[in-house]
């Protein structure tokens, strides 16, 4: 259990540090010219997270993957809490480090753009940590309802985890090729759906850094939508996508028992 917890903590820490760091660089410094560049860094973060953790755990790095693997019989039910706790702690620590690194620059950016932290306008800077729908960077181009946002996150997570099942089917422990393919899959899916929901796909990646934003002064802006949209879109959406992926894999692979 200690090895599993440590592996999930390390792997999730790496992917969130790389990914949220890339988003922060894009927002504060305009460091990238395209969404694809940020998506690629997320994909690389996933690949490196798998490399760093796979000898300690199954390198889920995502509660939705853990739920799906349990339903598919690849992970024992008794390990659920260990996996998810490791993921949450790793994501929280990574979010905290991103905050420490970027906080002075975020404050300067907010001052220069007359953004008061905790207001509606501060969603732009809070989006470095948790996700928002529609994506604050594309809000003037997209009108997105909560049901549509949930559907997008369900679809994106379904595709990711369904493909993970097939990429890793031949071996219980992922080889180098599998890690690269999973990272590439994440990159492609983010490129497709990030303009709408920022492409969460991972409840730990959203919730733990969002807590950092809440603690860092964004307050209610870190958890917007009085009807609980952040929970249904970014927690339940990916979990539902993972459940559907597990069921689809069992049906299409002939492993119904």
Image (cartoon, rainbow, N blue to C red):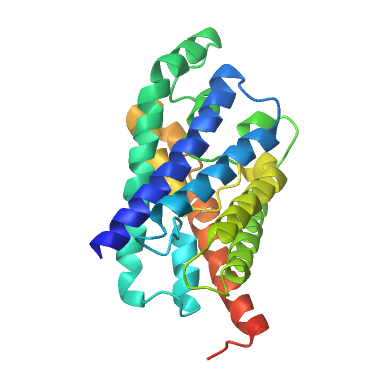
Residue extending furthest front?
Answer: 176
Extreme residue in the top direction:
112
- Which of the two residues, 35 or 133, is positioned nearer the viewer here? 35
Residue at 40% x, 20% y is 103
Q: Is residue 184 visible?
A: yes
Residue beneath the point at 65% across and 62% down: 159
Q: Nearer the viewer, residue 179 or 119?
A: 179
- What residue is at 31 percent from the left and 48 percent from the top? 89
Q: Against 96, is 191 above or below?
A: below
User: Is residue 214 visible in this depiction of the protein?
Assistant: no
Indicate whether 93 appears above or below 172: above
Q: Position of residue 32 (x, y in %)?
A: 65, 25
Q: Residue furthest left?
A: 2
- Figure quadrant of residue 33: top right
**Residue 71: % across, % down:** 48, 77
Which residue corresponds to the image point at 56% horizontal and 43% vertical from the top-left? 44
Q: Nearer the viewer, residue 249 or 139?
A: 249
Residue 142: image quadrant is top right
Residue 257 x, y percent position in the rendering: 52, 91
Of residue 223 and residue 100, the one placed in the foreground of this image is 100
In the picture shown, does residue 153 fall above or below 40?
Answer: below
Q: For the N terminus, which image quadrant?
A: bottom left
Horizontal side of 198 relative to 106 (left or right) equals right
């Amino acid at each position: 259990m200690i090895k599993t917890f440590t592996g999930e903590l390390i792997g999730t820490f790496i992917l969130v540090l790389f990914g949220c760091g890339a988003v922060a660089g894009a927002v504060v410094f305009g460091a990238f010219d395209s969404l694809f560049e940020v998506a690629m860094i997320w994909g690389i973060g996933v690949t490196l997270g798998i490399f760093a953790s796979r000898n300690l755990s199954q390198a889920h790095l995502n509660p939705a993957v853990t739920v799906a693997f349990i339903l598919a019989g690849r992970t024992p039910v008794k390990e659920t809490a260990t996996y998810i706790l490791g993921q949450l702690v790793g994501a929280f620590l990574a979010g905290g480090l991103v905050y420490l690194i970027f906080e002075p620059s975020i404050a300067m950016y907010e001052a220069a753009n007359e953004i008061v932290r905790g207001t509606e306008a501060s969603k732009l800077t809070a989006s470095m940590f948790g996700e928002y729908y529609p994506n604050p960077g594309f809000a003037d181009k997209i009108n997105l309802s909560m049901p549509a946002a949930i559907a997008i996150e369900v679809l994106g997570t379904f595709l990711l985890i369904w493909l993970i099942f097939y990429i890793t089917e031949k071996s219980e422990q992922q080889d180098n090729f599998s890690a690269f393919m999973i990272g590439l899959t994440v990159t492609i899916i983010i490129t497709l759906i990030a303009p709408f929901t920022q492409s969460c796909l991972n409840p730990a990646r959203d919730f733990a850094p969002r807590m950092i934003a809440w603690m860092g002064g964004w307050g209610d802006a870190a958890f917007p939508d009085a009807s609980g949209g952040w929970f249904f879109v970014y927690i339940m959406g990916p979990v539902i996508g993972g459940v559907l992926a597990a069921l689809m894999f069992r049906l299409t692979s002939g492993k119904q028992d």
